[in-house]
Each structure stands twice: as structure tokens, then as C-alpha cells.
Image: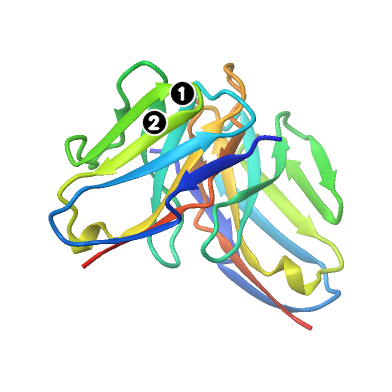
Amino acid sequence: GQQLNQSPQSMFIQEGEDVSMNCTSSSIFNTWLWYKQDPGEGPVLLIALYKAGELTSNGRLTAQFGITRKDSFLNISASIPSDVGIYFCAGGGGSQGNLIFGKGTKLSVKP
Amino acid sequence: GAVVSQHPSWVICKSGTSVKIECRSLDFQATTMFWYRQFPKQSLMLMATSNEGSKATYEQGVEKDKFLINHASLTLSTLTVTSAHPEDSSFYICSARLGSGRDPEQYFGPGTRLTVT
């Protein structure tokens, strides 16, 4: 079945640093979505991408839909302590609109 | 907009009992809702896809007779864990799909922590 490889698994950074994480797949997806999950909460949608090559920003977050439709990256600029959490990528395009999730990137920010 | 609620947020039950979890889309109609479970430090695992007015589609390995799903209205889907056992303890999260086309944006509920003793 379709699988997503998300990296890195975890990151420990200093406040103010920029962060980059990515997802790759051997399969083509029609959409890529990025979510953030805080402990004990449901994931919150950050950015949705619909076109190959699309670059979209949401505040300090920027994400791109790879031109091959097999990858996507998420960048966070000038990280702050509240950026701490687990970030999931998700590829979409199934017949019922289901998503395939990556294993997540755990971000820790040191003040 | 696109707010999804879940109830209860946590529940503790005894082994052998059944537990019902509700998922509601508060400000939009969702013809499709999804149920996931998540074990500690792991990603979300899709259990089933729930379509309003029809039977749910279960993922491979998920027992449909154990995890009963009902999607009776465009704003409500329920998951009932029947005869729960300790191994069913997990974090259950629902999501609702915004739009009826191929738009795959899913909005998640806050999750339900189930502990079976």
C-alpha cells in the first residue's frame, strides 16, 4: 500500500532557529497536507497543498508540493516555544478522500 | 470554521463493557467522517471511513463487529467499542471531511482517551 516516509523523526532546536522537515513517497499524491498535534489533542490542519510545485505560506510556516507529486516539505522560520509538538504530513487522493499519514516529526524548542 | 467535537474526551471502563464515542461537525455538514486510533508515540491509524446513510468501510484488520460505526446524520458519527478489553485502550480520534468532492481536507476532533481496566 501507499506509504509516506517522514523525516526527521525528531528535532531539538534553539528558539529562533529555522526548521525543515519533509515527506517522500514512492506513490503519487494529488494533495499534501501538514498537521500539528499537541499532546492529548487531535491534529490541527496547518497547510493544504493541491498543485504540484505549489508553495504556500501560513505565517511563519511554508510548505511546498513537490513537482513530482511524490514529496513535500514544511519549513518553520524563527521557531518559538509554542511550535513544540508533532508534525504530520498526509498525502491525499484516495477515492473516498482518505489520507495517508507519515509517522510524524517531533519538534522540541529550547527557549 | 470547520470545528469538530468529540465526546467524551476521556473514558475509563471495565473489561467486557461497551463504550460509545460521538463525533460531531459543529459548523459544517460532513458526508464523510473518519475514525482513527493512535497508540503512544505513533502515527494515526485509519480504522474506518464512515459515510452518511451507508455502511462504514473498515480497514484491513479492523473488526467491524467490535468497532460499530453509525453515521446517521450529516453532523454526527458514532463509534461503539463493544466488549472492550485492555488492548483496546488507545486514543481514538475522528475527523470530518470538508466538502463532498475530492477535496481531502480533514478536520480532526480533539480525541477520546479510552482506558479499559
In this view, the mark in front (1 or 2): 2
Closest to the observer, A11 or B116: B116
For this view, does B50 lie left or right of residue A26?
left
Closest to the observer, A96 or A102: A96
Q: Residue at x 53, y 25 (%)?
A: B30
Classify 10 Å Cα crowding around label 1: few (below 14), some (14-19), many (20 and above). Answer: some
- Looking at the rendered structure, which numbered label has been put on residue B49? 2
Same-chain check, marks 1 and 2:
no
Q: Position of residue A10 (x, y in %)?
A: 59, 71
What is the spatial separation of the Cα atoms under label 1 and label 2, in whole angstroms? Answer: 8 Å
Chain letter, disc 2 residue: B
Kindly state the secondary structure of the residue where label 1 is placed. loop
Query: Circle 1 sits on which residue?
Result: A96
Question: Pointer 1 and pointer 2: residues touching (CB < 8 Å)?
Answer: yes
Quadrant including the N terminus of chain A = top left
For this view, does B95 lie left or right of residue A70?
left
Q: Residue at x 17, y 36 (%)?
A: B65
Picture layout, residue A50 above or below residue A34: above
Q: Which amino acid type is marked by label 2? A: Thr
Closest to the observer, A96 or A66: A96
**Does the image show residue A105?**
yes
Q: Position of residue B67 (x, y in %)?
A: 25, 40
Q: Which amino acid type is marked by label 1? A: Gln
Closest to the observer, A60 or B97: B97
**Does the image show residue A66?**
no
**Looking at the rendering, which quadrant does residue A79 occupy?**
bottom right
